[in-house]
Image: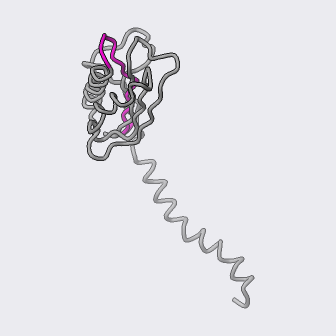
Amino acid sequence: MTNRRDFIRKAPVVAAVAATPALAVKATEDRKRPKPEKEIHYPGGGEPPENPLFSPVVSYGDLVFISGIGAHFEGDITSHTEHVLNEVEKYLEAAGSSMDRVLKVNVYLNSLDDYDGMNAVFLGRFGPEPGVRTTIAAQAGIPGDSLVEIDCIAVR
């Protein structure tokens, strides 16, 4: 090479040629890898209603999505939170996951006055390294008169 301009003009071509075999190997590996499929899980392995409004648990590859679970009975925030977390745990285990493999949790409270009571029950339920969490108070309340509703995303 006689000068910098010649080097700069030829350098991208050299880099592209060097990367081509690696890209071909990756593309071949991607084609061989099985595509994840959406799988619906119903409590107790039962069949869904004829036309369900939503799915309670969906897995896609190694991810598990739990829809919002509430407590639809008379009680206080501690009994509602305990019930909901037990249901979340049951659904996760049925889908091949667990509470300590949860990545993201959304908590919907009927009232922010219940924040401390919910946290008292919530603390420690997702293991020593819990996932991220968002907590809000639903302005119009939670459907079905639940004081709390929780959904989450986990990995198997």
Q: Is residue 81 magenta?
A: no
Q: Quadrant of residue 142?
A: top left
Q: Residue visible at 29% across and 23% down?
A: 78
Quarter in which the N terminus is drawn: bottom right
Q: Quadrant of residue 41?
A: top left
Q: How many marks?
A: 0
| Residue 133 drawn at (x, y percent) | 41, 38
Above or below: residue 56 compared with residue 100: above
4 on left or right of 18? right
| Residue 100 drawn at (x, y percent) | 28, 41
Above or below: residue 130 compared with residue 139: below
Front residue of 13 and 68: 68
Quarter in which the C terminus is drawn: top left
Q: Magenta span covers which residues?
A: 60-76
Q: Is residue 72 magenta?
A: yes
| Residue 64 drawn at (x, y percent) | 36, 34
Q: Residue visible at 26% across and 36% down?
A: 125
Above or below: residue 29 compared with residue 34: below
74 on left or right of 16? left
Q: Residue visible at 45% across and 50% down?
A: 30
Front residue of 53 and 142: 142
Q: Residue visible at 41% across and 48% down?
A: 32
Q: Residue furthest front?
A: 113
Q: Quadrant of residue 120?
A: top left
Q: Residue furthest top?
A: 50
| Residue 112 drawn at (x, y percent) | 44, 26
Front residue of 102 and 148: 148
